[in-house]
């Protein structure tokens, strides 16, 4: 029972990451009709916003280690700690959540520049061309990050108070051995709130209503005198921000490196396809479904019966879903049918 | 009686002439340097240059390690050509290297990008051999790559001096006559680590292994399992994890209720950083199981990887091939040269690559030729010192180097940004030696068609 419960938690946690990226991908595809292979790179850029913020708050006074003469080795003490004592140390400790405030404007700006500078020129091109250009862009972005930050992952610890594990077993009367990291629980909550916010924005605001109308019929909305392209630009920027903030929040779980976006991108596309191209609800459902299926497939009991199943399960599920439901779980007729 | 001599050549005369011609033709093989001039691939002949092929990961997850390997190679080339302070040329013995190139030829190089992918590594090695005309290929940060490139080099008749490769297979079942490894291996990690684990954690432990699902992970798991079971430890479970899994939570959570009190992570690079970080987040190091503190062991780690793991690596035991803090003359000479050139200490990958280049160059000098079979014979059974880790022996039977192995712990209180590993034990060479037969395999011929 404990094992099943914990794998459900693992699956939800994993699914939350997939769903968040897939949500942005679907949003961009549904509104702009763009298959954006650079979306994973936006997730990675968000993570590196956290890295940059941490570097900024830990700019340090360097005291040289005189015992080493062959090269310059030094011990660092952040200026924030020197100047503000415990308050400075607390700011550094909370650098990951604080970096969300840093990442939001940067990711909005990146999204805006990317859409206006490149993406808009490919609205009327084929999906194959869109994939090629956005994939190329993703590679350029990741190589730039590698050139500046190196290839090694960079640790981004969660605040000390959230670094340990919660005794979730005791919450549900399942015993004391059932623990789960606080930060993962926070990530799960954050994902839920973000997904709900995006849906609420699209469902309950006039702006969202216009965007949804534009997703259905761009030309008619344009004929009503609404500058739908401008709204779509903002939607692209919002999608970039969602991916970026998801990247920031994921850094304590997975120390960021230049390739992390690409690692998630392939899985997220599987999620989008299983969910149904252009379906926001489908992307979220598929994200959680695949996350849970992947976690259960990794259980030792399952692997004993089907060795190696954990490595292929996502693709196996995708094949089965697409055989039974060719448009995915919630795909609409006419989307990518041409 | 007809004694008129017949014109032409008698049978005896023909035999004599043939024997003399054969003797004359073979004479250079005995007395003349480079007598095999026309007989082997990429013979530098009368050119004034010798070209080496540095095949390292310049892109992909090990690009930082590859960059450090390349720095070391460039330094080795400088030193071989008499530039800089000479580095380990001053401490390596016995050595015929003089800093005037190799056999009078200036050392140059070509580079390739392995991308840490076997097919890409083979392609770049092939390109360097066929287009750049390199005489020796070296480098790499993965056992999968090393095994693939080594096999290619055997087919091509080009010597391969492996870089960072830790799988037993490289000099075990996949060993090749043309391949040599200076780096230590998984067996040696197990043999070095076991006594320290016994001392620190006792002999009554239950271990759970998470293992990268490829050649290196398999052999490390086997070696560490054998070593710890010999101590009296019980192996609760061994679980293979996909390379590059990213999130290891679904593999870590079963450990919590498995009854194990030690988690052994047979992961390297990004996988190690991720699995260790996540294992610590799941509170494993704060747990008490079977009345003992739960422990995590990472049998192979490097300073570069320790950097990525941050605080999670603190206090974790493992082994490493070499560390810049070693105080022997060779290590210090290398650290000094490297530090002066690049402003940072070399990694263990850099040290092994530098040493391999010098060892190959010296073997050519000793052989008096670049002809690979003769160079191979010089490296086989070669005893040397002054390159770090004490007296070292290149075993002829499997081309594995034997030297002291370092057991290290993630430093709890680093004095600088580079002071991440603390050497807790230097395991003597004799303790990590083994019978070369146990891993099978065959070296293959000296002469390839």
Image: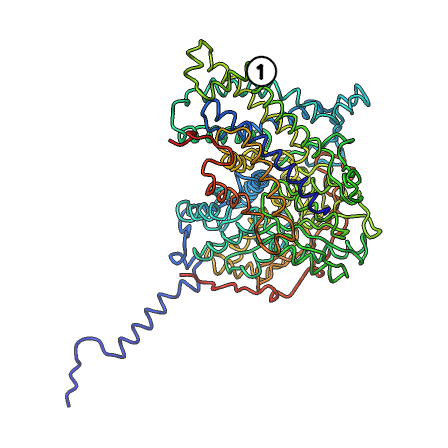
Query: What is the x, y in percent for residue B429?
Result: 70, 58
Give B54 or B123, whichever is nearer the viewer: B123
Q: Is residue B304 above or below residue A128?
A: below
Looking at the rendering, in which quadrant would you find the C terminus of chain A?
top left
Q: Does residue B142 lie above or below A223 as drawn?
A: below
Quarter of the figure with residue B194: bottom right
**Farthest residue in the right direction?**
B291
Q: Residue tagged by mark 1?
A: A205
Circle 1 — which element?
loop
- Tell me if A165 is positioned left or right of B320 in this view: right
The chain under label 1 reads A
Q: Dot 1, how many residues are within 10 Å of its Cα: few (below 14), some (14-19), or many (20+)?
A: few
Dividing the picture into quadrants, the one containing residue B189 is bottom right
- Residue lying at 48% horizontally and 22% vertically, measured from the top left: A31
Residue A58, given in percent of the width and then of the height, sits at 71, 25
The picture places residue A108, in percent across and down from the top left corner, at 57, 19
């Amino acid at each position: 029972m404990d094992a099943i419960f914990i794998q459900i938690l693992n699956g939800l946690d994993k699914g939350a990451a997939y769903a968040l990226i897939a949500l942005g991908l679907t949003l961009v595809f549904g509104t702009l009709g763009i298959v954006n292979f650079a979306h994973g790179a936006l997730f990675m850029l968000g993570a590196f916003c956290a890295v940059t913020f941490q570097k900024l708050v830990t700019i340090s006074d360097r005291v040289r280690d005189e015992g080493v003469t062959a090269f310059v080795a030094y011990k660092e003490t952040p200026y924030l700690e020197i100047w503000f004592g415990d308050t400075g140390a607390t700011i550094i400790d909370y650098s990951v959540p604080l970096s969300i405030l840093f990442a939001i404007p940067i990711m909005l700006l990146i999204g805006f520049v990317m859409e206006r500078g490149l993406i808009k020129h490919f609205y009327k091109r084929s999906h194959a061309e869109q994939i090629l250009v956005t994939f190329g862009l993703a590679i350029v972005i990741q190589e730039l990050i590698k050139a500046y930050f190196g290839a090694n992952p960079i640790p981004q610890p969660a605040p000390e108070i959230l670094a340990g594990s919660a005794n979730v077993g005791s919450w549900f009367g399942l015993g004391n051995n059932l623990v789960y990291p606080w930060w993962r629980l926070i990530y799960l909550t954050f994902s839920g709130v973000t997904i709900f916010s995006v849906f609420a924005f699209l469902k309950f605001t006039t702006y969202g209503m216009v965007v949804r109308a534009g997703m259905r019929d761009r030309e008619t909305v344009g004929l009503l005198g609404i500058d739908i392209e401008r709204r779509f630009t903002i939607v692209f920027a919002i999608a970039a921000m969602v991916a970026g903030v998801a990247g920031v929040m994921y850094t304590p779980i997975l120390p960021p490196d230049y390739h992390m976006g690409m690692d998630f991108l392939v899985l997220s596309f599987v999620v989008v396809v299983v969910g149904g191209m252009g379906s926001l609800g489908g992307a979220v459902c598929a994200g959680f479904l695949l996350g849970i299926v992947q976690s259960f497939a990794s259980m030792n009991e399952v692997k004993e019966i089907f060795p190696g199943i954990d490595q292929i399960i996502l693709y196996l599920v995708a094949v089965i879903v697409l055989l039974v439901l060719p448009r995915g779980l919630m795909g609409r007729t006419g989307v990518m049918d041409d | 009686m007809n004694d008129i001599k017949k014109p032409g050549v008698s049978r005896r005369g023909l035999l004599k002439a043939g024997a003399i011609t054969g003797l004359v033709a073979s004479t250079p093989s005995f007395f003349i340097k480079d007598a095999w001039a026309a007989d082997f691939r990429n013979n530098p002949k009368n050119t004034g240059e010798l070209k080496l092929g540095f095949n390292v990961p310049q892109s992909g997850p090990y690009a930082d390690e590859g960059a450090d390997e390349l720095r070391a190679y460039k330094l080795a080339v400088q030193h071989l050509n008499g530039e800089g302070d000479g580095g380990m040329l001053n401490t390596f013995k016995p050595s015929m290297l003089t800093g005037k190139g190799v056999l009078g030829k200036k050392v140059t190089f070509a580079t390739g990008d392995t991308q840490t992918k076997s097919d890409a590594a083979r392609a770049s090695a092939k390109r360097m051999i066929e287009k750049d005309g390199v005489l020796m290929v070296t480098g790499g940060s993965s056992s999968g790559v090393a095994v693939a490139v080594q096999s290619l080099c055997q087919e091509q008749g080009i010597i391969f001096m492996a870089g960072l490769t830790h799988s037993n297979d490289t000099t075990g079942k996949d060993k090749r006559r043309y391949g040599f490894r200076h780096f230590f291996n998984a067996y040696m990690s197990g043999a070095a680590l076991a006594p320290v684990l016994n001392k620190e954690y006792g002999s009554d432990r239950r271990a759970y292994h998470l293992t990268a699902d490829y050649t290196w992970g398999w052999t490390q798991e086997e070696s560490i399992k054998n070593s710890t079971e010999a101590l009296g430890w019980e192996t609760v479970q061994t679980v293979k994890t996909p390379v590059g899994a990213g999130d290891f939570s679904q593999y870590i959570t079963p450990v919590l209720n498995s009854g194990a009190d030690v988690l052994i992570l047979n992961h390297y690079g990004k996988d190690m950083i991720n699995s260790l970080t996540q294992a610590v987040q799941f509170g494993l190091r704060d747990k008490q199981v079977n009345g003992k503190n739960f422990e995590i062991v990472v049998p192979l780690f490097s300073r570069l990887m320790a950097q990525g793991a941050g605080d999670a690596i603190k206090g974790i035991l493992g082994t490493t091939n070499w560390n810049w803090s070693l105080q022997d003359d060779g290590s210090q000479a290398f650290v000094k040269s490297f530090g002066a050139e690049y402003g940072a200490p070399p990694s263990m990958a850099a040290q092994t690559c530098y040493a391999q280049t010098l060892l190959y160059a010296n073997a050519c000098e000793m052989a008096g030729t670049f002809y690979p079979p003769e160079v191979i014979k010089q490296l086989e059974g070669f005893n040397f010192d002054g390159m770090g880790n004490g007296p070292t022996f290149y075993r002829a039977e499997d081309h594995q180097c034997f030297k002291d192995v370092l057991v290290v712990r993630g430093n709890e209180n680093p004095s600088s940004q580079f002071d991440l590993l603390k050497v807790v034990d230097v395991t003597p060479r004799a303790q990590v030696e083994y019978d070369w037969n146990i891993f099978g395999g065959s070296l293959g011929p000296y002469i390839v068609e």
